[in-house]
Image (cartoon, grey):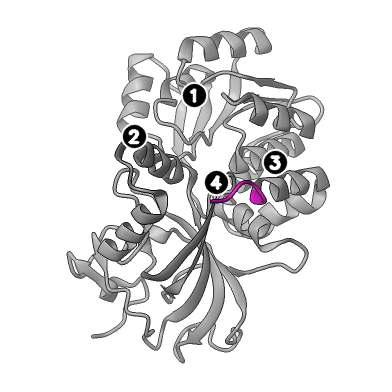
Amino acid sequence: MTPHPFGLHRSLDPPGVLPQVAQRLDATPQPFDNEIAIAVRALSIDSASFRQLREAESSTGESVRDQIARIVRERGKMQNPVTGSGGMLLGEVAVVGRRHPAAQRLAKGDRIASLVSLTLTPLTLDTIGEIHLQSERVDVTGTAILFERTLFARLPDDFPEAVALAAFDVAGAPATVLRDAQPGLTVLVIGTGKAGLLCLAAAREKVGGKGRVLAVEPSRAAAERARALGFADAVFVIDARDPVAMLSAVETATGGRLADLVVNVANASGTEAASILCARDDGAVLFFGMATSFPAAALGAEGLAKPTLLVIGNGYVRGHDETALGLLRRHPALAKAFAALAAGPSR
């Protein structure tokens, strides 16, 4: 078998397709000569998937730990069959194939985090340890395979691993805000979890003193945390699945002008209509939440007669890993909030 740069050789069901599309991957820990084997220590489960796993635990009794073990065992990767999403990993380099492009700059033991989804990463798990509820991180031991074209980043020395992993996991969203927001605009961020806090900081930097930054968050505690950071001009405690309440709040806050840019990083489904309603007709909505439904967004905009630009956020923006770390370095209070999230309750 000839190893493919995108990992097609690891797809088993069906064979020969892109690994993200495959239902099952060959997760054999021994790497081909254009692959890297990683001794995995932690998984950062994406927020929509983690929420669904916890809801399934409540309804079926199957623990989050057992669900993760079953999914990885059945699929050879961590891809939630309900949300279709995965997350990221961190660990140490175990083996670098001689033909891998990073063969000369990586060494055994180097600490790295993957910058691509677990939905396309071959993975075997030996043990599953603590599950960190607040940071959505799972301590594990196992082996992952990174392909020739798989993105990764070395872990920085100036942040705890959990903080860096949390930042890398959502780096595409704030990097896009820094790219697309402009001075003087009004930016609305839906959801103030890890991605939301970084997006608020990015929006504040770009819109400046003449712009406005608004946030919506259903949890009072999370909303208060966002307020304390001072990036947002207003933080509304509203469930974004209530489009009427959302529209009323944003209309009042903007004098009816609405938001130029809406950034949806919510981990719950059913927030598409509110996102579209709160954006100006000539504005844009960036959907970064993995719970986003394309039909709900596209058909919802049509039904509301809104010509607003709808954008599916690309998790990869050039330099997004350093962009996220840069935001944390420029805003110590934000870094502290991340550290508190990463040190949340475990089980």
For disc 1, the neighbor class at 10 Å (few under 14, some 14 to 19, many from 20) is many
Q: CA distance from mark 2 to mark 1?
A: 13 Å
Mark 2 vs mark 3: which is more N-terminal?
3
In terms of image quadrants, where is residue 163? bottom right
For disc 3, the neighbor class at 10 Å (few under 14, some 14 to 19, many from 20) is many
Q: Residue at x 52, y 22 (%)?
A: 282
Q: Which mark is residue 294?
A: 2
Provide the major secondary structure of the magenta segment: loop
For disc 4, the neighbor class at 10 Å (few under 14, some 14 to 19, many from 20) is some
Magenta range:
342-347
Q: CA distance from mark 2 to mark 3?
A: 26 Å
Give coordinates of residue 121: x percent, y percent. 39, 66
Mark 4 = which residue? 133
Q: Residue at x 49, y 86 (%)?
A: 96
Mark 1 = which residue? 275
Query: Is residue 152 something one can see in this rendering?
Result: no
Decide: is 152 above or below 340: below
Question: Which one is in front, 309 or 242?
Answer: 242
Mark 3 = which residue? 202
Q: CA distance from mark 3 to mark 1?
A: 19 Å
Q: Secondary structure at mark 1?
A: helix
